[in-house]
Image (cartoon, rainbow, N blue to C red):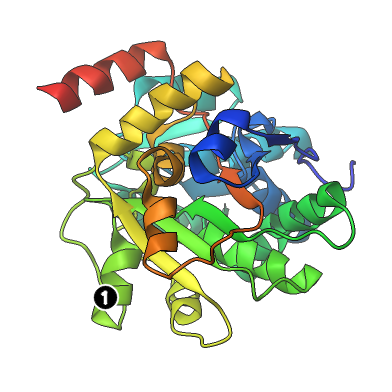
């Protein structure tokens, strides 16, 4: 068996984004992972530690964690059951089935699906694969920062890291990676869409907050409560985490602009991070003194594109413009 299931992904310089921000922008292309997103790093790492003697794995997911779990389970030769909420696109269900997974549709949002996954783990003796809240996941995700450090070379480090937050797994993983390479002084800009903003709500309240509902179209960001570790990091003096929101319309516009400029289709969840560049938010944070001027290279985590196609993009445009 391979040492790991993920690929060492490209780090590409974006000329268009660099022009907008006024500094070099580097894109960590996690959308090019075999499962379509960064999730395979942590889930692959966790499964290698926990699944060897398993009857099968069960994972609740809006898309990307499920795709990673299904891919890894297939490679390891164990059955996978993926529980998805009814808000997941048919495209996701089909792709999960193509990986050989059994798909169960339960509830309206991820939290409902997760309750069912936990029940199945208990009643059927399956290994539960958490999508974002586990130290082994964060350890696995941290590998992307080690790759960035190797790509940038000695003596170069990012001026800031830009990423999207759903349940907080990517944020915790990036922080783990920054610790591993000695970059904890690098600020993180953590982006969410309005209506899937459990991290921002927690940061503002100074405690964990559970949203009443997920009203954003960025379904892959759709956890109603962020993981405890992500919130704890937001309260930590040694780290600088700037939590910001964009609208669904801004995230969608970013997806379209990214497709035009970089020739890559990503999902709305990823568009939340890209929107920080395209909407001028990074510049605003510099004007407000939240980010330094001049800013060193901006590292953008292009987290994934596994749950979007042109038909869905057209539907989103129609939905968000009416």
Left or right: 75 as drawn, with respect to 116: right
Q: Sort mark 1 into few (<14), some (14-19) or many (20+) by Cα contacts within 10 Å.
A: few
Q: Position of residue 39 (x, y in %)?
A: 60, 46
Left or right: 10 as drawn, with respect to 18: right
Q: Using the rendered image of the protein, determine whether residue 86 is visible from the camera's viewpoint.
A: no
Residue at 89%, 48% (x, y): give it: 3
Q: Position of residue 33 (x, y in %)?
A: 68, 34
User: Does residue 26 sit above or below 311 in this rendering?
Assistant: below
Residue that numbered label 1 is attached to = 204
Residue sticking out furthest to the left: 322
Residue at 65%, 75% (x, y): give it: 185
User: Does residue 151 sit above or below 187 in this rendering?
Assistant: above
Q: Position of residue 314 (x, y in %)?
A: 30, 14
Specify the quadrant that holds the C terminus.
Answer: top left
**Relative depth, front residue between 226 and 149:** 149
Specify the quadrant that holds the N terminus.
Answer: top right
**Relative depth, front residue between 71 and 276:** 276
Q: Position of residue 49 (x, y in %)?
A: 76, 60
Q: Element at badge 1?
A: helix
**Relative depth, front residue between 200 and 27:** 27
Residue at 52%, 30% (x, y): give it: 305
Residue at 52%, 21% (x, y): give it: 261
The answer to which quarter of the image holds residue 19 is: top right
User: Does residue 151 sit above or below 223 in this rendering?
Assistant: above
Left or right: 248 as drawn, with respect to 149: left
């Amino acid at each position: 068996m391979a040492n790991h299931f993920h690929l060492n992904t490209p780090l590409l310089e974006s000329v268009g984004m660099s022009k907008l921000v006024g500094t070099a922008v580097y894109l960590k292309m996690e959308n090019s992972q075999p499962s379509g997103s960064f999730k395979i790093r942590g889930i692959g790492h966790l499964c290698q530690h926990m699944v060897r003697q398993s009857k099968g794995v069960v994972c609740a997911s809006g898309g990307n964690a499920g795709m990673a779990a299904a891919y890894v389970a297939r490679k390891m030769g164990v059955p996978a059951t993926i529980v998805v909420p009814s808000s997941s696109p048919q495209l996701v269900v089909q792709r999960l089935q193509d990986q050989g997974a059994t798909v169960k549709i339960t509830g309206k949002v991820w939290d409902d699906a997760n309750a069912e996954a936990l029940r199945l783990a208990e009643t059927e003796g399956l290994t539960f694969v958490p999508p974002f809240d586990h130290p082994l996941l964060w350890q696995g995700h941290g590998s992307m920062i080690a790759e960035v450090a190797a790509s940038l070379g000695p003596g170069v480090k990012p001026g800031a890291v830009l990423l999207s937050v759903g349940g907080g797994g990517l944020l915790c993983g990036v922080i783990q990676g920054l610790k591993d390479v000695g970059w904890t002084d690098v600020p993180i800009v953590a982006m969410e869409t309005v209506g899937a903003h459990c991290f921002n709500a927690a940061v503002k309240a100074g405690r964990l907050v559970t949203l009443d509902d997920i009203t954003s179209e960025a379904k892959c960001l759709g956890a109603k409560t962020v993981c405890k570790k992500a919130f704890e990091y937001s309260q930590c003096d040694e780290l600088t985490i700037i939590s910001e929101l964009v609208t669904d319309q801004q995230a969608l516009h970013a997806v379209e602009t990214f497709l035009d400029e970089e020739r890559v289709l990503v999902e709305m969840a990823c568009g939340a991070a890209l929107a920080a560049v395209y909407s001028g938010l990074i510049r605003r944070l510099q004007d407000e003194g939240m980010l330094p001027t001049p800013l060193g290279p901006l590292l953008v985590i292009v987290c994934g594109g596994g749950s979007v196609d042109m038909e869905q993009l057209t539907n989103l445009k129609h939905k968000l413009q009416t």
